Image (spheres, rainbow, N blue to C red):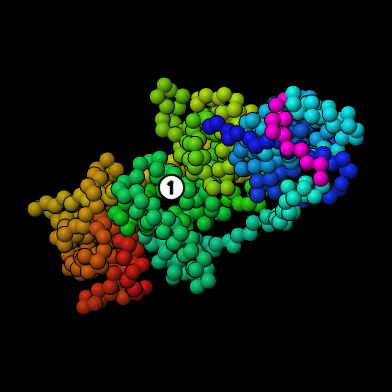
Amino acid sequence: MTPPTPPPVTLIINVDDDTRVLQAARASSDPQAGQATVDLTPHTPRTAYLPRDILRALGRTDYQPTASEPITAAPAWRAAACWITVLGIRRLVILRAHHLAEARTRHISQLRQDTGIHLVLIAQPPTRTAAARLRTRLARHHLDHDLQQITDSHEALDLLGPPAPHRPQPVPDRTMPLPDLPRLPVARFRAELRRCLPAADFARVDAQYRAGLYAARAYLTRHPGLPTQQDLEFFLSRLTTSSPSLRHTLTRLRGAQAGFLRVGLLLDLPDDLDRATGPGTTTRPFTPYTANRISRGIPHPLQLAALTALLTTGTHPDALYATPVAALDERCTRLAVPDVWHPEHGSTTPPPAVVYAVPPRARPVLRTALRFRRSEQAQDHFLLFSSSFGHRLTDLAHDASVDIPALGPLQPGPDWHHRARCAHPATTTPHTSTDQPPQHHPRTKEELQLAAPPHLLSSHQRADLLATIGPPTDTALPHDQAAPVVEILRHYLGSRRPPVSVSEDLLADPMDRLLLDPASTPQWPIPHPDLLYALSAGAEYPCRS
């Protein structure tokens, strides 16, 4: 992308050394509003200090690391250009410009050409000779074209503008913990919460449950049909990367499973979520407090992006180390990390990558890293987080002053959302024999056949299906008990409801064969609340518990 043509340079000659001009320049510095003021470090003629001063003016405050290696001159200049572009800085004010040496002036000119910023130089030359030398240096590096020189203090104050509004530092994150959650499948999860939790606790848990439910409903409305594996990983990562705890993650996922059931899709999740790595389990929400704290100690775009990726993906550092430049899309919303745990990893035809969603607050960081690698002429197969892993991770985490769960002891293996699967439920009719009564036989995964697009079974098919679902003692469900259930399903899932798939796996395994409420009578059969939740009917119709 070609940078815009920069406006002419403005040179403010503060001959009288008016302190109001310096104070106004410092007070108007606001990177969020597109203006930054660089206060040069005194008595430092070395070229490496100026880009660090620029990084400090852009919000990378503690540019001097305590444990990790300091950023050198060439990467610092590229980092400053990337941050100016990504943050949208339109005006860069440099104080004490009469101290700019030849090399610094050359780099400032190149920075102006690369970013298209409006460069404002405020100088206090002690003599006319020093002022003439400053203009000569500017002309030598093509900074004198249409140069606007200001000597009046009032005109300089009008140019610098009013003081920037006070922006307080982000406060530490506070999250209300959730109560203990039952380890139940989605069909019985919300109903059990309603029965065992107080009203206040249930309201907080139900808010997370509904967040997952509505997110799944919105996603499936925009993307109808069976999602691909990578699209499913992107949805699950986007849903859980902002989760503050494992209980929040589990509740959101149960709500998402209910949302998938509403359109006849089964979302199968791993059982070891409390030990697995991935979004929502070994991640931390990338809040303003976390973003501000981690960026103050790590000015290097690649190192900052590496720690940000660890915080937002929760995957193993070895997986992020192998991430190429092409793994990050141009909008910086999706990160595709190689599947290092796959047996075919490293072959000529590598397996599909693991997809992660990048939170909105983390996108500027990764966008800066991508521009930084592009400025180094890095090809698509080059490593994205170069020189950011290995023995440097511990030092970078120390400078960031943020607890990163992915740097602790992790369970080896693929992340949980990479093992999640979504499929249509099976709708095979049971096998019957004329010699023996129908019995319930557990099916293997190979015997299960995926259904066609979701459809509503007829009453006869549902009766045959429910007749094969026996209680835990493997005794068959009598037909006279299955018939009322079929009629209830027809009533609840008739023309007022969208079609759903009904199968043995949907009713038997998630429901544990709980079909009727204990308060049911032959004259007044009542469906079990868990059954209604499993068939996406419990949210609209009242039921007894």
Q: Residue at x 43, y 23 (%)?
A: 347
In the visual, does 218 lie left or right of 324?
left
Q: From this viewpoint, which residue is outermost toward the top? A: 348
Identity of the amino acid at label 1? Phe
Q: Which residue is mark 1?
A: 235
Q: Residue at x 25, y 45 (%)?
A: 450
Given residues 137 and 387, the one toward you in this image is 137
Position of the C terminus by quadrant: bottom left
Q: Quadrant of residue 51?
A: top right
Q: Residue at x 74, y 23 (%)?
A: 140
Secondary structure found at label 1: helix
Q: In the image, is residue 146 part of the stretch drawn in magenta? A: yes
Q: Quadrant of residue 62?
A: top right
Identify whether 464 is placed above or below 53: below
Residue 166, image x and y in percent? 72, 56
Q: In the image, is residue 268 part of the stretch drawn in magenta? A: no
Given residues 288 and 124, the one toward you in this image is 124
Residue 393, image x and y in percent? 66, 35
Q: Residue at x 59, y 62 (%)?
A: 176
Packing grade of label 1 (10 A; few <14, some 14-19, many >=20) is many
Q: From this viewpoint, which residue is outermost toward the right? A: 127
Identify whether 56 is placed above or below 455: above
Identify whether 336 is placed above or below 376: below
Q: Overall secondary structure of the magenta stretch? A: loop
Residue 11, image x and y in percent? 76, 37
Residue 93, image x and y in percent? 74, 41
Question: Residue 506: in sight, yes or no?
Answer: yes
Region in magenta:
141-152
Given residues 544 and 57, the one toward you in this image is 57
